[in-house]
Amino acid sequence: MADVTISSMIGDIEKYKFNPVMIQRVALEALRIASDNTLNIVDPTNPFVFCLENTATNVAAFMQQNEASTRRLYPSSALTDEDLYLHMSDKDYIGRFATPSSAFFTVLLSKTELLSRLILDTLTGIKKITIPRNTYFTIAGIDFSLQYPVDIKLMPHGGLQITYNNTIESPLLPLTTNVVSWDEVSDSSNEYYIRFTVEAHQFNVITTYNDITTASGFKTDITMDDQFYHVRCYLQNSSGVYVEIPTTHTQQIYDPSVVTAVITVLTKSIRVVIPIIYISSGLASGKLRIDLYQTKGNLRMLLGNYPLEDFNVNWYNINKTDNDIYSTAISNFKTIAIYSITNVDGGRSSISFNNLRSKVIKNAIGVHNLPVTNIQLVSTLEDAGYDVVRNTDTITNRIFLATKDLPKPLDDRIITAASSSMATANFTLGYVGKKNCVGVIDNGDSLTLTPDTIYRNINGIVKPITQTDFDTLNNLPLYEKCLVITNGGYLYSPFHYVLDATGKTFEVRPYYLDNPFVEAKKFIYENTTVNMQVSLDSTYVIYKTANGYTLSISTKSSQNYKDIPDKDVQVQLGLNYRNEIDKAYLLGNLIGTDATTGERKFEFYLDSNFDIDSYDYLNMGSFKYANTSIVVKTQLLQEFDVYFTASNIPFYSSKINDELGFFQLNKGAYGITHEKLKIRFGYPLKNLWVKARSNVDTMQYQTYSTSVEAVYKEDILAKDPITGSVFEVDKNGNVLKNPDGSPKYNIAHHKGDPVLNLDGTKVYETKANEIKYDKDGIPLLINDYRQVLTRSVDILTIDGVYYFAKLNNPVSYITEYTNSIVDSLLKWITVDLIEFNSTLLDQTKVYFYPKVTLGDIKAITLNSLEVTIPASSPLKVELHVSPITYNDPVLLNALSKTTIKTIDAALKNNVVSTSAIEYALIDAYGSDVINVDLYGIGGPANYKAFTIINKSSNCSIRKRLVLLPDNEMIVEEDVTITFIKHGIEV
């Protein structure tokens, strides 16, 4: 009898462990071998066969289930969302699904009414009111919600305090601070308002109340209009209070002793189940409240374009127990205003399985109060819509680049986003400053590159163009000008860059200075004894000019002030600059008087060369101190004093006179009103990537222009070799005398004689082109050496076609779009990244780096060659369509837009394939297009497929300038779409 061993059967189990038929076959074969062929069961009705089949099936099922259960222990082996959910905590689900965008809303409350409506808290002795936790701000049908109540308190010392109440923490938004920024402002009637700003997120909450019964268990479906963000469940206790219970998204993990709701996210609804174990044990019964948070995900809105009356607010508490006398008081306010100037651009849809899997494996899922690893930081930034590139990663320093595409236009006349790059411009300060490059302000050892500086990329070398080149370009015929600009590689930056060589190291600092505004007005004092009123009207405005800024104000005054002759009224601007105690002053210019109201209008010319020092102070040259013109330094957010004065009026002294600069004022002038204006000139862009380096040049040292022969500076005396005497002596040893009786010296070399080498050749004191040295032997630098060093500077640039289009027509949708680009960049750089950087540890920094979709990028082709391709390319598309489609212009226009949108979406991928794009186009066209051919991907080489190496780069569709019949220049995608009729006319 042959041996049949268990080890041999187990050793082969991998071959058939999931195949019951093979297991049965192996068992029967083992029986045959063990019985020396004496047993051969062939009857399928034999009970032995039935038992064997049943056993084989159970064994296979057990082994399959065992392997699946074992695999679920490791997230790297996960194959489904449910596998990953086993490794996620409750908080890890935050961010797993769609995430909302956010906006900052400003609330204005009448100070008088606020103080009158504050309610005394008898426990603390402090008066307060509360803005409800779930307050909604609604604009254009889009809801933005708070997650924390806001307490406004009048403190015992008489000051106001505005804070978030974080007694109950929201799992969706951990607070980094409970302080709410606020200030006090006044209008033209000197009515005071408390102004504060809160951040709200774009979601709304669907609340349902349900009964849990022991008879049927609990399961309910809730329909959603938008995308799923989060869900919170509350069980009513015996006191009628709703207490939050945990939630999970898997039936496999929950604590049987703690009531837990199981959530399943479906396409347009969610399912909430309370497992029967809680109901049968009596832990879950009564009322269940479900709060479903839904959001639109990615959203782009320009809230600043909406008028004040379009903003609505709903003071609301979901939890009715939060309604008290403090939270209901706000709904009774009569004088209140809500507005926002935020450019909303954020949020995203649910992350993919592969992305979720990566985050779970790297422990980078959920909310991170303090990113402590690079993986968690990357995850946090990706949740906010950024791609992340690691630039520097050392023990002492870690730098990440957060990159993002420029926002897409809201106007459908431009379909795709503008192309951008971080261009490395190469130049010398001397060339750029002295050669009169367009848009460049020369401040000596520093330059300011303004947004009017035009750069040109020629074969990968980026330089500013000169004023002459700019004028030549603008003088071209408009049609030719459009072609030259489209093909010329022109770039511009929306920011100012200060190139500072005044210190020991060369620095580059970016700023945004183009859209100044008055942030607040405050009334300080009025000289009531003069019996007249004058103050700032609410129409004050400040705007940037080529030479600085102009502040324009109008008066709101009483008749007796209007009756004063123009020559006797003056307005003075005062500034405590830097750390100076004394003020500098600027006198306003009377522009005119409104013919209807009789109110006067003044303008202040704040001259500036836009030179900003390393402390972010802006130079201004129009102020005076003690009648002497001086250059003052203002902060980018600066408060100015405004003094209204008049002369030849009855003398009434006041404390305003103690602050005036009388050297500028008329004789006998006296102060009437003192107010303050807080002006925002711009923003320092600390979190925008900038890099600069200086290239050493031999021209940095002083050299001699000519050769100079060496001569003896004094007479050189010769000593007698025997006596050592320097005097001439006769044969008797007597010193010879000069006619004047002085001793005669023995002179070897007279003063002025040339110095010779031993071989008789001339010695040179200096030679032409030799380096000059100081007395310590250190080479002397030329006086303007900083001007001749070659500098390489990284500058954020945008496709120049947009600059020339808005230059052609400043009031157009192109200008609106470029303004929205700047607004988005400012939010990303001055809001988002400031928040991210505040949570980082040690020497870790995150900088904004635009997605490079312009210029040259590196890619790998199908034959594994690394090549340089243009990021932005013109494209050609041929569409074969039926005669019906060909004769429908509306449909052809729709197909053109679909073509551009589909190609643009495909170019966002790391791997770009012409055939994949063509398949995507066919899928998007449906039956309207028979065939499509695409040309031009990857530039003139027309690569069929390639992989982009750098994560911060993408391909894009090139833009072109187009001249309309009315001579307006517009920007459109450089895609030539040819429709070819195919088929038989019906």
Image (cartoon, rainbow, N blue to C red):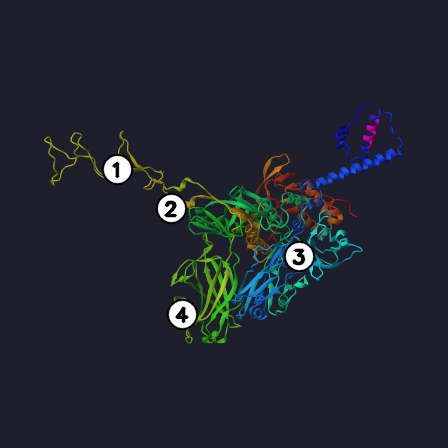
Check if mark 2's residue and mark 1's residue have beta carbons within 8 Å. Answer: no
Pointer 2 or 3: first along the chain: 3
Q: Residues within 10 Å of mark 3 (few under 14, many from 20)?
A: many
Q: Quadrant of residue 953?
A: top right
Number of numbered tags placed on the structure image:
4
Location of residue 708 (image quadrant) = top left
Tell me if residue 667 comes above or below residue 244 in the rendering: below
The part of the chain drawn in magenta is 24-33
Query: Relative to 586, is 11 above or below?
Result: above
Residue 27 falls inside the magenta stretch: yes
> Element type at marker 3?
loop
The residue pinned by badge 4 equals: 666
Q: Residue at x 39, y 60 (%)?
A: 629
**Local crowd size for mark 1, using a 10 Å CA cut-off: few (<14), some (14–19), many (≥20):** some
Choose the circle earlier in sequence order: 1 or 4: 4
Asked whether 141 or 966 is in front, the reply is: 141
Disc number placed over residue 711 in the picture, else none: 1
The CA span between labels 2 and 1 is 29 Å
Q: Residue under circle 3? A: 203
Name which residue type carries label 4: Asn
Q: Is residue 561 left or right of residue 113?
A: left
- Crowding at label 4, few (<14), some or many (≥20) Cα neighbours within 10 Å? some
Residue highlighted by disc 2:
783
Which sits in the foreground, 967 or 766? 766
